[in-house]
Amino acid sequence: MQSAYTVLILLMLVSVSKLIGRVIPIPLPLVQIGAGALLAWPSLGLHVALEPELFLFLFLPPLLFADGWRMPKRELWRLRGPVLTLAVGLVLFTVVGVGYFIHWILPSIPLAVAFALAAVLSPTDAVAVSAITQGKLPTPLMHMLQGEALLNDASGLVTFKFALAAAITGVFSLPEASLSFVIVALGGLAVGVALSWGLGRARVWMIARGWDDPATHVVFMLLLPFAAYVLAERLGLSGILSAVAAGMMQSWLDLLPRQTSTRLLNRSVWSLLEFSLNGLMFLLLGLQLPDIIKLAVSHEVTLWPALAYLCLDVLAIFAALILLRFVWVQSIWRSIGWIRQWRGKPELVLVPTARSCLLLTLGGVRGAVTLAGILSVPLLMAPGVPFPERDLLVFVAAGVILLSLVTACIALPLLLRGVDRSPDERLEQEVQQARKLTAEAAIHALEAEEVVEAGTPPDAAQAVMVAELKGRLMAEYREELETYNDTEEAQALAMQRDLLERRLRLMAIRAQRLELYSLHRRHLVGDDVVRKVLAELDTSEANLV
C-alpha cells in the first residue's frame, strides 16, 4: 500500500505543480523539481527507491513514442540537413570532446564511463524549451530543436549503451562498434516500423468487422511503445529507436476511417500520459536531490568544501557542453549555408545570425531523457563490484539538467525580446486552401449524390425532403466559401456572421446543459442519459470554442 500511496501523492503533485506554474512565472520543470526537493525534506521525508532497469522501461518508451508521433514529418524532412548534423554529428562531437574533458577534470571517472556520461548528457528536451519560450521562438528554430530532440534521444542513448558496455566489459573496438551501431540502429528502426504497421493492419481488420470500440484501440496503442521496445531489446537491437520508429509510423496509420472518436480519445489519453510522465520525471529528480548530494559527498571528510568543488566541476562541464554546442552550431550551420549558395540552392528557412545561433545553442536544454538514462546506470558492474563513481555521475547529470534549465529560463526570454513572432504564412495559406477545397468537395458530393433509403422506392415526398436537406447543407458550405473571398468587406461580413452564429450556438448549448442538470436533479433522467447527452454537448462546444 505504501507504493500506491506514493504514486498517488506524486500524481497529485504533478497536477498541483501545473496550477502553481500558472501563478508563479517559473517554467514548470523547475517548479516540479523544487516540489520534489521540498517533499524530500527531512521533516517530510518522502523517499522513492528507483530500480534502474524498471525506471528506463516505464518512462522512456512512451515518451520517445509520443515524440515520434508528434513530430511534424514534412518539416523534419525539409530541415534534415541541420537536424541530422545536430542530432548525430553534435552527439558524437560532444561524446568525444566532453568525455575527455570529464575524464581530465574528474580523474576518478574512467574514460569509458566519462564517454557514457557525455553521451547521456547529449539528448535535449524540446518540451522544456517550449514551456520556457511559450511559443515565442521562431517556428523554424522550434522545428530544428524538435527534430534534434527526437533523433538525438535515440543517437545519444544508443551511444550511451555502447559506452556502458565498453566500461563494464573493458573491451572496445571502433570498427566493430561502428558496425554494431549500424546493425542495432537499423534493426531497431525496422522492428518499430514493422510492429506499428502490423498493429495498423490489425486495426483495419477489426474496424471492417465492426470492432471499432475506441477504448480497445487506444489500449492497443498504449501498449505499442512497450511492445516495440521489449521486442527489439530481446532481439539484441535498439529498443529506443524501435519506440521512436513506431511512433513516427503510427502518426501515418492514425488516419483510419471510422475512427474519429478513437482519435479524440487517443489524443486526450496521450496528452495526459505525457504530462504525467514528464512531471513525474522532474518530481523524481527533486526527490532524489538530497540523496544524490549525500551520496556524492559521502566519501569526503568535509561536507561544504567538497560540495562546492563538485558544483564547480558541474559548472565547468556545463560550460564545456555549451561551448562545444555553440562552436558546432556556428560552424556547421554557416557551412551548410555556404554549400547551398555554392550549389545554387535557395537559402535555408532561417538565415544564421548571432541571435539565432545563441537561441539554438541555449535551446539545447537537458531534461527527462538525460535523467532517465543516468538513473538506468546499473548499481553493480559484476556481483559484489559497484559501478565506478555512479553517485558522482548522477550528481553531475542532475546538476547539468538544473543549470541548463536555469540558464534557458534567464537567457532565452532576453534573447527573444524584439523578435518578430508573426504567424507562419505558409501554414496559414495551406490551412485556408484545405478548408476551401474540402468545402467545395462537400458541395459537389451533395450535388451528385442521390439519397434514397435502402429498400424504399423513391417518391415525390422523399425527393422534396432530400432536396431541402441538400440545399440546407450546400448553403452552409457556400457560406463557408464566402469567408475566402478576397475583398475586405466580404471577409468582415463573413467574420461578423460567424462570430454571431458561434455566440448563439454557444448560448444554446449552455442552455441545454443547464436544462440537463435540472432534469437530473429532478430525477427525470438517469446517469447513463446524462453521460451520453453531456458528451455530445461538450463535443459540440469544443468544436465551437
Image: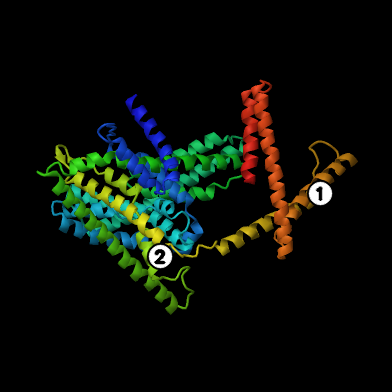
State the scheme by which the image is colored. rainbow
Residue 193 visible (yes or no): no
Circle 1 sits on which residue?
A: 471
Residue 106 visible (yes or no): yes
Q: Residue most toward the right?
A: 460
Element on which disc 2 rests = helix
Residue neighbourhood size for the residue with mark 2, other residues' Cα within 10 Å, grouped as few (<14), some (14–19), many (≥20): many
Circle 2 sits on which residue?
A: 82
46 and 185: which one is in front? 46
Q: Position of residue 393 (x, y in %)?
A: 22, 48
In this rendering, is residue 142 above or below 3?
below
The type of residue carrying mark 2 is Pro
- Kindly indicate the quadrant of the structure image that contains residue 151: bottom left
Q: Position of residue 295 (x, y in %)?
A: 18, 41
In which quadrant is the N terminus drawn? top left
334 and 194: which one is in front? 334
Q: Position of residue 409 (x, y in %)?
A: 37, 54
In this rendering, is residue 113 above or below 526?
below
299 horizontally vs 93: left or right: left
Element on which disc 1 rests = helix
